[in-house]
Image (spheres, rainbow, N blue to C red):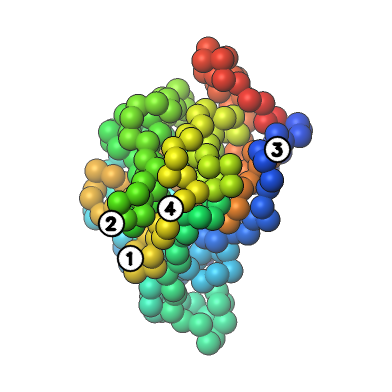
Amino acid sequence: MAIQSTFRPVFPIFASIAWGTLAHAATIMEITFDTWADTNLDTNLDDGERVEETSGNGYHGFWGSTNGNVQVIAAPNGAGIDTSGDRYGKVFLRDGLTSIPDAWDGPTTTTTPYFTLDGTQSYTFEAVVNWNSTTEAINGLMGQTGGNEFWLRESGGFLHYAFVSGAANANLFSNTIDISAAKADGQWHGIALVYDATAKEIRAYLDGFLLHTNTDTDIGSLGTILNGTSDFSVGAYNGTTSNYFDGLQDTYRISSGVLAPSEFLAVPEPRVALVSSLLLGLGLLTRRR
């Protein structure tokens, strides 16, 4: 069963700012938590339960929980999950996953593939989340670790990420991108990370406002980032409990190409006042709405 929210998000009223040449974007992976294989017909997401990946590419996953089930909740874009407090867990996107409902892919498609990411191409990574609990120092959002990897997390109130292809990388582990105000306010927020291979930039956004631009020389020249041989995590970025996201989770999405801020996942008001005050203090305000 799926829970549908009655909330209708407020959409942008200002034109977006163009960044170079915007490549055509298509959704690679999207987890909305709207549909899962609920064998108990309840409102909890159970350990091992299948979760639909809604891009149409068939990258379905399953919920992995270390200490019980999580509650399915109403969220800005439909359904979501509550992993605050002691309810840890994440979605594993896994190759060859069986027991996929026929309604998701049709009767002939019952296993899921892995997906790959190529550092010479552009991508946009997004999450709509709400830190309603701050017990974890590290809150993983998505990713895969290993010799070739991408991951995105919040750590101590700062946004961290890694793009790795063998010995080459375009990482930001330093406490540079401060999102602590969003972590503390108990509201829904949208995080977006744009890997722009053409402009050779990684741009980080909070609620559509540009917070930071990384111009590392490896950006755009990395090879294989995800090689399609390992699980990809959503709601975490690897397998340790301390790196699960602690709070409410609505949507995770990866798109090919560069999305403009007006194309990011919608998040509910209020958020402009919070981010405007943060960015005006830094002199970095870039209006999206």
Q: Mark 2 or mark 1, which is nearer the start of the sequence?
A: 2
Contact flag, marks 2 and 4 (Cβ < 8 Å): no
Alpha carbon of mark 3 to alpha carbon of mark 2: how far?
34 Å
Task: State the SS at label 4.
Answer: loop
Identify the residue at horizontal 38%, vertical 77% (top origin). Answer: 96
Tag of residue 18: 3
- Neighbor class of circle 2 (other Cα within 10 Å; few <14, some 14-19, many 20+) is few
Alpha carbon of mark 1 to alpha carbon of mark 2: how far?
9 Å
Query: Which numbered disc, 3 or 1, marks the residue closer to the eye?
Result: 3
Q: Left or right: where does residue 270 sit relative to residue 282?
A: right
Q: Looking at this view, is 70 or 278 the one in front?
A: 278
**Disc 3 residue type?**
Ala
Identify the residue at horizontal 50%, vertical 39% (top origin). Answer: 202
Identify the residue at horizontal 28%, vertical 57% (top origin). Answer: 147
**Disc 1 residue type?**
Ser
Q: Position of residue 181 (x, y in %)?
A: 45, 23
Query: Which numbered disc, 3 or 4, marks the residue closer to the eye?
Result: 4
Judging by the rendered image, the residue that carries numbered circle 2 is 146
Q: Position of residue 184 (x, y in %)?
A: 41, 25
- Neighbor class of circle 1 (other Cα within 10 Å; few <14, some 14-19, many 20+) is some
Judging by the rendered image, the residue that carries numbered circle 4 is 222
**Disc 4 residue type?**
Leu
Q: Mark 4 or mark 3, which is nearer the start of the sequence?
A: 3
